[in-house]
Amino acid sequence: MTTATAEVPDEEIAKRLTSPEVSNRSVAQELGVSWGRVDLVRQQLGIDTYQRGRRVPEATWQEAVGRRVKAVDGGHAEWTGGRNPNGVPVLSWRSIAETAYRAVFRMHHERDPEGNITHTCDRDHCVAGEHLADRVLRAERRAGGDGGA
Ligand SMILES: [Zn+2]
């Protein structure tokens, strides 16, 4: 009587989980352990779960943001994700926890916002990328506005 499956150390499983392309099932079969055991080790390693033939859901924060932004009339956008107790939209995804404004801004402008983010429209909690401004954009608008030559 042996309990072989209990003797495979996590390290042996971890050694084989080198990328999302390695499936839990193949490792489980190779080592004679359960799928759940492999998945647990994978989670501890922070490796995405392999899924045949389709993309891992929300593999990137951009995708996570995109799914939570809903365009509404007037070029505005609504946040369908979570909110903090003050009603401010927040992105909470994997290790990321920040206001949706910062996340949307970064995605829209492809850079980190500087200073506070303010709205250029008057819709409460709007998350349209074009309606968010950081210190740099505010300065540019002040300098370039009002028909200056
Ligand atoms: Zn807006």
Image (cartoon, grey):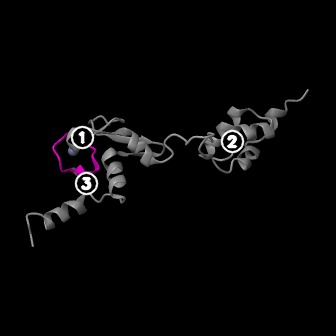
Amino acid type, label 3: Asn
Q: Position of residue 42 (x, y in %)?
A: 64, 42
Q: Which mark is residue 23?
A: 2
Q: Which region shows up in magenta?
A: 119-132
Q: Position of residue 149 (x, y in %)?
A: 9, 73
Amino acid type, label 2: Ser
Q: Residue at x 48, y 48 (%)?
A: 60
In what element is the residue under mark 1? loop
Q: Nearer the viewer, mark 3 or mark 1?
A: 1
* CA separation in Å, label 2 and label 3: 43 Å
Q: Work out whether residue 116 or residue 79 is closer to the camera in this orientation and state it.
A: 79
Image quadrant of residue 32? Answer: top right
Mark 2, other Cα within 10 Å: few <14 / some 14–19 / many ≥20: some
Left or right: where 96 falls relative to 17: left
Instruction: Look at the image and say whether residue 122 sits in the magenta stretch.
Output: yes
Left or right: where 147 falls relative to 26: left
Q: Position of residue 97 (x, y in %)?
A: 40, 44
Q: Work out whether residue 62 or residue 41 is closer to the camera in this orientation and state it.
A: 62
Q: Work out whether residue 119 or residue 77 is closer to the camera in this orientation and state it.
A: 77
Q: Earlier in the sequence, mark 1 or mark 2?
A: 2
Q: Please, which residue is most extreme toward the front here?
A: 53
Left or right: where 4 falls relative to 27: right
Q: Which mark is residue 115?
A: none
Q: Nearer the viewer, mark 1 or mark 2?
A: 2
Mark 1, other Cα within 10 Å: few <14 / some 14–19 / many ≥20: some
Circle 1 sits on which residue? 125
Q: Residue at x 42, y 48 (%)?
A: 62
Circle 3 sits on which residue? 116
Q: Ligand 1 closer than 8 Å to the CB at disc 3? A: no
Q: Nearer the viewer, mark 2 or mark 3?
A: 2
* CA separation in Å, label 1 and label 2: 41 Å
Q: Quadrant of ligand 1?
A: top left
